[in-house]
């Protein structure tokens, strides 16, 4: 047994304890139990690739790189990461770049956090129709927000926001929902900035948002089923006809859907900290895994039914792998999307225009930028910064070269590379 943390309950505001690098990871689980899982389950090619990438991440399969200290000249060799967006150990570079771009887009206005969640009755459809269901979730939720913003009784302006899709719950069950970061206001047809009447407490009434969101999603789902875009698995196959499908939706789908709207962030700094945590996260991070013993995985989860307290739970290792893989997204699927005046291709001009109208600009503090832009200190002297000077791919080809050719050849000869 590999025991990392004491088994106890933590308050929601308490961070998880530090986990040593030697603790169990998702990669360890895949390497040990992956062959048996593949032999007993039919996997999609995308799921096979995710398992392969995580198993071989930072183990030499994807190549190597060398870093040197800019102060003392200390040289270190490292193994390249897989860069798979589902890998818990990757995506730090992509996250920092994305967050830095969002910092540059911050406006001197309030921001709200809204969450649109699908009822669990749709989980079977999501498992077999990921692209259709998640596209429809994005479309229904975003159009609901846009319509409320453009409604003259609500705001009468075009708001700007972006959404981040999460498909998991605390225990890795399927729980599709989208986190939206929404500006508390928008631009009207005259180019003027408008703010909601109750922007200090809420953006739009959540019950009204919920009703419109529900109607849009169900209408879109009926249209998709009528066009033959949905696969109806298991017991749902009996509802393959349009009339039967409508009857199933009418009698089974709950009336009240969950749309959650938090009070506005206290400032742009909080927006940056939030998006830095949630944008490129995976179904479970490695530091949540406590131990693997007797084919059972113990890990932390946040219990939302108990004031979001950190608690521990267990899963058979095969069920753990199965739950992890149901969150693999379709190829080229965009899990972060932009809308309103923040839509791709429009954001730059629109933001500049809004800043001119408001007459100010918000910049993140040095402390926040340092939090986002991690600096890799030299482990030898502790003062210098480690700089990447040479990168090889998995076939030994040079991908990046900073040193002169002679110095590069010396490194390769010393490492036994051709």
Image (spheres, rainbow, N blue to C red):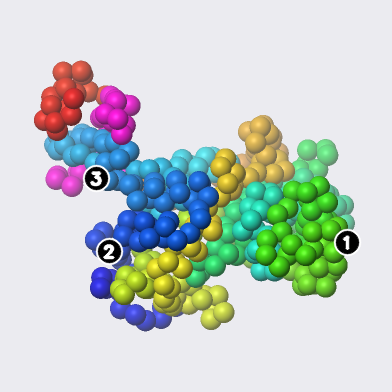
Q: CA distance from mark 2 to mark 3?
A: 23 Å
Q: Secondary structure at mark 1?
A: helix
Left or right: residue 72 compared with residue 105 = left
Corner quadrant of residue 175: bottom right
Image coordinates of residue 157 in percent, x first then y, are 80, 47
Q: Secondary structure at mark 2?
A: loop
Q: Is residue 331 above or below residue 129?
A: above
Q: CA distance from mark 1 to mark 3?
A: 64 Å
Looking at marks 1 and 3 on the same chain, the residue that comes earlier in the sequence is marked by 1
Q: Which residues are magenta?
A: 375-401
Corner quadrant of residue 38: bottom left
Residue hosting label 2: 23
Q: Nearer the viewer, residue 9 or 399?
A: 399
Image coordinates of residue 115 in percent, x first then y, are 65, 61
Residue hosting label 1: 243
Looking at marks 2 and 1 on the same chain, the residue that comes earlier in the sequence is marked by 2
Q: Which quadrant: the C terminus?
A: top left
Corner quadrant of residue 190: top right
Q: Inspect the magenta stretch and tell me whether residue 146 lies in it.
A: no
Q: CA distance from mark 2 to mark 1?
A: 53 Å
Q: Residue at x 27, y 46 (%)?
A: 59
Left or right: residue 132 compared with residue 41 = right
Q: Which quadrant: the N terminus?
A: bottom left
Image coordinates of residue 256 in percent, x first then y, are 77, 72
Looking at marks 2 and 3 on the same chain, the residue that comes earlier in the sequence is marked by 2
Residue hosting label 3: 377
Q: Residue at x 48, y 63 (%)?
A: 322
Q: Inspect the magenta stretch and tell me whether residue 398 lies in it.
A: yes
């Amino acid at each position: 047994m590999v025991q990392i943390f004491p088994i106890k309950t933590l308050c929601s505001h308490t961070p998880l304890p530090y986990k040593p690098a030697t603790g169990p990871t998702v990669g360890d689980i895949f390497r040990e139990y992956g062959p048996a899982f593949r032999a007993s389950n039919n996997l999609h090619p995308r799921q096979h690739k995710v398992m392969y990438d995580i198993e071989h991440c930072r183990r030499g399969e994807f190549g190597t790189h060398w870093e040197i200290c800019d102060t003392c000249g200390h040289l270190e060799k490292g193994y390249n990461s897989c860069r798979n967006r589902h890998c818990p150990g990757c995506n730090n570079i992509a996250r920092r770049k994305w967050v830095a771009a969002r910092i540059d887009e911050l406006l001197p206005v309030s921001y709200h956090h809204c969450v649109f969640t699908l009822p669990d009755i749709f989980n079977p459809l999501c498992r077999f129709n990921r692209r259709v269901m998640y596209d429809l979730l994005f479309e229904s939720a975003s159009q609901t927000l846009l319509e409320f913003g453009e409604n003259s009784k609500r705001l009468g302006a075009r708001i700007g926001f972006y959404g981040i899709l999460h498909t998991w719950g605390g225990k890795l069950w399927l729980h599709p929902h989208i986190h939206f970061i929404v500006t508390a206001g928008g631009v009207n047809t005259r180019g003027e900035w408008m703010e909601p009447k109750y922007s200090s407490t809420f953006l739009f009434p959540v019950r009204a948002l919920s009703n419109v969101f529900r109607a849009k999603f169900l209408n879109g789902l009926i249209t998709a089923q009528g066009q033959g875009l949905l696969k109806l698995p298991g017991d749902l196959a009996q509802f393959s006809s349009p009339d039967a499908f409508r009857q199933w939706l009418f009698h089974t789908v709950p009336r009240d859907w969950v749309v959650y709207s938090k009070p506005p962030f206290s400032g742009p700094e909080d927006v940056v900290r939030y998006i830095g945590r949630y944008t490129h996260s995976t179904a479970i991070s490695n530091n949540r895994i406590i131990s693997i013993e007797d084919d059972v995985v113990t890990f932390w989860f946040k219990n939302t039914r108990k004031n979001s307290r950190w608690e521990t739970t267990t899963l058979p290792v095969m069920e753990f792998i199965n739950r992890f893989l149901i969150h693999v997204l379709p190829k080229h699927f965009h899990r972060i999307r932009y809308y309103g005046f923040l839509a791709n291709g429009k954001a730059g001009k629109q933001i500049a225009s809004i800043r001119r109208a408001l007459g100010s600009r918000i910049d993140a503090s040095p402390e926040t930028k340092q939090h986002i832009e991690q600096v890799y200190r030299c482990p030898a002297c502790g003062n210098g910064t480690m700089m990447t000077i040479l990168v090889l791919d998995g076939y030994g080809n040079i991908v990046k070269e900073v040193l002169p050719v002679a110095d590069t050849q010396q490194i390769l000869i010393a490492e036994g590379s051709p």
